[in-house]
Image (spheres, helix red, strand yellow):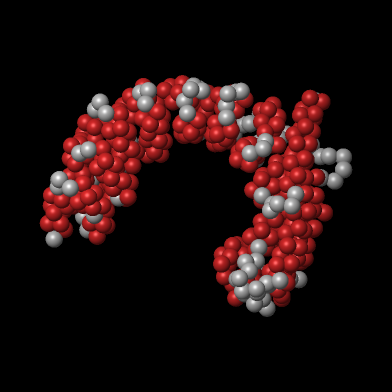
Amino acid sequence: WAFRRLFELESECRSAAPAVQVEAIGEFPKLLDQFPFPMLVSSAFLKLGDLFRGSANSLRHHIAQVFETSQHHLAQIAHTEELLKRVLVVLYSNDPIARVLALRLIGNASSVFARFPEAQHGTLLQYQSTHPLEIAAAVQTTERMLEFSPGFLDVVWETAWSKADRSQVPDPVRAQLIRSLRHAAPRLQLSVQLYPRCRSWVGRSDSTAVVQCAALDTWRSIIQPHNELAATDAEFVSHLITHSLASVRRSVLALLSRWRPTRPTNDDGAARLAGISGLLCSHLAAQLGGNDADDLGEIRLATITLARIEAACPPAGPPQSWAFAESLAGKALRTFDDARCAWTAATRLPYRHLASSVMLQVNVATILGEDSTKARTACAIRDAWLAMAAACEHTGDAAYIRRFLRLSWAWCKSMGVEATVAAALPALLGARSCSIAYTAAAIASLP
């Protein structure tokens, strides 16, 4: 029956009515999911390849969508090279739209096509095109192929490198091309070459925010023990901490989170760390002092980076990173208590916000390594446990709450401050939430 249905779909695909053709092509994924037999899968995709080779572009678009929808069946194709030959006929045609669709199909089938030199060479040739859609499709296909064939990076490296340097390339295409170069991270020689180029893309006057974000993300991905972020480069990107766009701020803070500052050996190094600390403090003060909702992602990255700087170069007064983390946790606890007191059936309590804020205190206390901050963090954990125990049952965040309780207890045990938190266990055992009570019982049973 399955093969009879396949032959029916093939005949419908060759109908003169476009609506019948599109409807028949849309039935292929259903047939493959219902009968995922290797022989049927191979026959179906080969027939789709024949249709792709001889159809109009409107039909080729729907065939490429079938390859995307049914890509989990591609590994069962027995004659992958024969299928690729049918697609390459379209890739080498004179119609740029047809070449774009062929590139899209190759990208959707990268799990089986990426290892073939013919597919790699065909994709590389399209970088010479002047058609913007074709270049964008080539970049997208390259990104997909690199996931399944890391060796393709050697083939496309010089072309992608030079193309990413051209400001004439549209920003979205250029950004995707720069992000595709992150696959150089495991390769020492290539990552060392890419490091200064990422710095150049961030600092160029013609680089837009889209390109800067892509360069910062790629720069972060190639940071390795053998390719660390230098203090001068941390200072270079730190001016973007106060950028007006949140996407740029998150990218630069994520890059700085990979930086491991060391104790300065001269006045220039100390001044450099002081300048970065000042920018981080200004940013955190603006974030925590505003009336808008706190961006926990930005606050967490900025606070942890500031804590690492203060651990490497202890300030004269109390650590600012701890003050910001404690302020955020206190604010989150007050917000949670207010929401708990005004709870209704339609209210969603901010469990995640409270747990994330307290865990930020845990991170900062661990980095600073001071006994006083560890003790005060244990008190913050105890207060958060008590607030959650008094709250009404809310099952939507049960898994998140359980993880918070276990992680915070494990940290207290490792730091020797579990006695402070253990005082909240009776309240947790009597919590209205069954999930919280069960987790508390599991914690209480631990040695």
Q: How far across and down, in percent of the image, does residue 301 sit? A: 67, 44
Quadrant position of residue 234: top right
At 30% from the left and 32% from the top, the residue drawn is 97
Which is more toward the observer, 101 or 180?
Answer: 101
At 66% from the left and 58% from the top, the residue drawn is 353
Quarter of the picture containing the C terminus is: bottom right
Q: How far across and down, in percent of the image, does residue 342 sit? A: 71, 71
At 66% from the left and 49% from the top, the residue drawn is 295
On the rendered structure, is 206 left or right of 369? left
Which is more toward the observer, 315 or 253?
Answer: 253
Q: How far across and down, in percent of the image, does residue 428 sit? A: 68, 73
Residue 379 higher or lower than 50, as above or below: below
Q: How far across and down, in percent of the image, does residue 413 sit? A: 70, 61
Which is more toward the observer, 315 or 290?
Answer: 290
Mark yes or no: residue 152 visible.
no
At 77% from the left and 40% from the top, the residue drawn is 282
